[in-house]
Amino acid sequence: MILLSRNAQQIFWLGRYLTRIQYLCSQFPFKYNDDALQYAHAFCLPAFDAASLNELILNPEQPASFHQQFQYAKDNIQDLRGVLSAHAYAELNQYIKNAKENPAYICDVVGDCHEVLEAEASDIFLFFKLGQHLEQLDRQLRLKQDIQGTVYYIEVVVGLLTQAGWDSLSEIWMKLKQQPDSMHFYQFSDHIQQLFEADA
């Protein structure tokens, strides 16, 4: 890979965290107890109705809160200073600063970051997309949502990564594609982690 493994992994997780925030923003505040319980059970969160889940999401001490997820994304951006262009790094930091000063802006920062990273080198955006789509697939499997579109995009990303040297990824991906369940998802996710570590 052209990118250092550690940098690629940080970009990958940035994609996952921002996508997680984006979906949470689209659902928050939860209005119906059934929807809240489905989400809480899917992600093993200690909530028993819409009100308690909304409270948890706003509690900065909770790992699943807006605050914590945003902090994870912020930390990844800070660690990418030597990888991103000076312009992109400055833009991302400005978005982060705006969101920190005005929490309501957190839900807008995902799209802004996506546009900035899309303009960066293709390998940077590739790992960002891998993180995005893997996070989407994780959520869709947990919540029993339609995965067809996400599977298509992961297929494209896997093809590009295979061409770039991650030859073993396609075989594991085919197993997940043929049997899309949590077990095969975690096998695929773990294999990606192993590839990051092998390239380190």
Image (cartoon, rainbow, N blue to C red):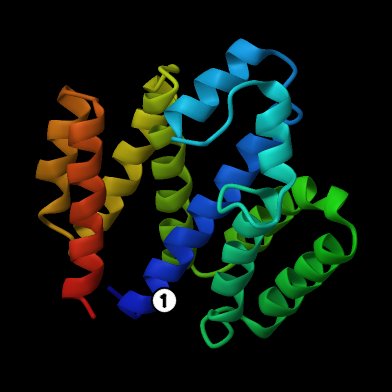
**Image position of 91 (left or right of 170):** right
**Image position of 156 (left or right of 47):** left
The residue that label 1 is drawn on is 7
Above or below, comparing residue 156 to residue 142 in the picture? below
Q: Secondary structure at mark 1?
A: helix
Residue at the spot x=36%, y=77% of the render? 6
Residue at the spot x=69%, y=13% of the render? 32
Above or below, comparing residue 97 to residue 110 in the picture? below
Q: Quadrant of the C terminus?
A: bottom left
**Image position of 59 (left or right of 132):** right
Residue at the spot x=45%, y=35% of the render? 43
Above or below, comparing residue 166 to residue 104 in the picture? below
Please give the count of numbered marks on the rendered protein.
1
Q: Is residue 169 visible?
A: yes
Tag 1: amino acid:
Asn
In the picture, residue 52 is in which quadrant?
Answer: top right
The 10 Å Cα crowd at callout 1, few under 14, some 14 to 19, many 20 or more, is: many
Q: Which residue is the extreme one toward the right?
A: 102
**101 or 180: nearer the eye?**
101
Q: Quadrant of the N terminus?
A: bottom left
Residue 49 location, x and y as percent? 64, 21
Q: Is residue 3 visible?
A: no
Residue 24 location, x and y as percent? 64, 37
**Image position of 66 (left or right of 186):** right
Residue at the spot x=39%, y=33% of the render? 137
Residue 100 location, x and y as percent? 82, 65
Residue 79 location, x and y as percent? 54, 81
**195 or 85: nearer the eye?**
195
